[in-house]
Amino acid sequence: MTQLVPVRKPTDLILDRIASDLKNGKLVVFPTETVYGLGANAFNAKAVRRVFWAKCRPADNPLIVHISEKKQLKKLVKAITPTAKKLIAKFWPGPLTLLFFKSKRIPSVVTAGLHTVAIRMPSHPIAHALIQKAVVPIAAPSANTAGKPSVTRASHAFEDLFGKVSWIIDSGPATAGIESTILDITQSPPVLLRPGAVSKEKIEKVIGKIAVHSVVANPKTVSKKLIAVAPGMKYRHYAPNAAVWMVSPQKLAQIAKQQSKKKPVAVLSLKMVRSKKILSFRFSSIKEMAAELFHCFRLCDEAGIKLVLVEAVSEKGIGLALSNRVKKAATKIVD
Ligand code: TXA
Ligand code: MG
């Protein structure tokens, strides 16, 4: 049975019951400031295996471990370097995931056999209260079926995971709407594995220049070396059933018009593309477009759209994360 419960305040009593179930091996969908997570007790290998099963996730794609207090970190990792200390002081709690060499306490199923573990401390008050009450770290991927867009509303998790999890906590739409930034600080210079809500520019202000992994749109072109560094990168992500094209602002209106003669088309853009035939989503900023991207992908599928055209944006700040997600979902890029 799956129970969907609204939780608005960290003091809601139902959280005690949910946290206790989580500690005892049950699966729980919970809100974070980025996207909803599908959580299990990170120390319980059996529960973690069920997370992979519930979202049909390949076992070679590791999970992020979520903590509620900085002091929990020490037991989970081999060492906390000066670079890690600076980043933690500046960005935790918040949407920055850091890679550390793992300690023996973390079962290998969590990290897909890797020697590194990804750890983050969410700033969402309900996530914080849940992890604190569970008293254990929570291993959690995004709460979508593998390959589908990440979950920014509890109702999306219900669509994907009904019958497979014990609880779905509904705390309203996720604010960032895009997953955390992932930074590998086991390498020097540190490597940005996934851009997210904490921008590259903000990180570089704190620790200096970092390296960036380029986006790999086609899994067949991924090298073995890349898979070893960032296993998640070999999978196509975030995609709706509809085809997705990333299109330059100059060509958007023209391509939308042409394509809408042949099939149902939606456009996600900063400027208005007018046509009776087109389902048009217009955003007032890149930040808003990032926050709504996954929700819009799901709305497009519900509306029977066959082609989603997304306006290409500047890759500064949150624009880099948005562009990364669109490229990973895209079947074609039109410059
Ligand atoms: O915002 C977020 O990060 C959300 C919320 C729920 O916290 N979580 C999330 O998890 O996006 P997931 O599993 O959907 O994405 C985590 C990514 C995957 O691509 C995975 O391959 C990568 O992190 N990852 C996890 N552990 C890793 C490791 N040890 N080395 C390299 N990549 C790792
Ligand atoms: Mg995910």
Image (cartoon, rainbow, N blue to C red):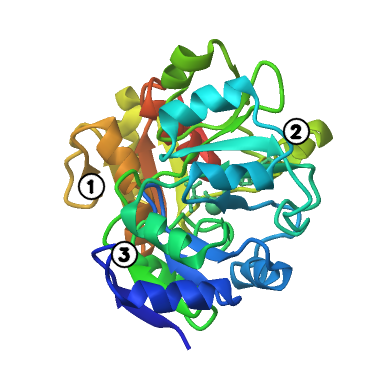
Q: Residue furthest front?
A: 71
Q: Secondary structure at mark 2?
A: helix
User: Which amino acid, by three-letter code, is at mark 1?
Assistant: Ser
- Residue for badge 1: 280
In this view, the mark in front (3 or 2): 2
Q: Residue furthest bottom?
A: 1
Q: Considering only order in the chain, which callout, 1 or 3, is on the residue closer to the N terminus?
A: 1
Quadrant for the C terminus in the image: top left
Q: Position of residue 258 (x, y in %)?
A: 33, 40
Q: Considering only order in the chain, which callout, 2 or 3, is on the residue closer to the N terminus?
A: 2
Q: Residues within 10 Å of mark 3 (few under 14, many from 20)?
A: few
- Residue for badge 2: 226
Q: Quadrant of residue 245?
A: top left
User: Which amino acid, by three-letter code, is at mark 2?
Assistant: Leu
Q: Position of residue 72 (x, y in %)?
A: 57, 48
> Which residue is depicted at the point 56% across and 56% down?
141
> Does 238 appear above or below 26?
above
- Residue for badge 3: 303
Q: Secondary structure at mark 3?
A: loop
**Figure disc tally:** 3
Q: Considering only order in the chain, which callout, 2 or 1, is on the residue closer to the N terminus?
A: 2
Left or right, 71 with reference to 223? left
User: Which amino acid, by three-letter code, is at mark 3?
Assistant: Ala
**Residue 116 - label:** none
CA gap, disc 1 and disc 2? 37 Å
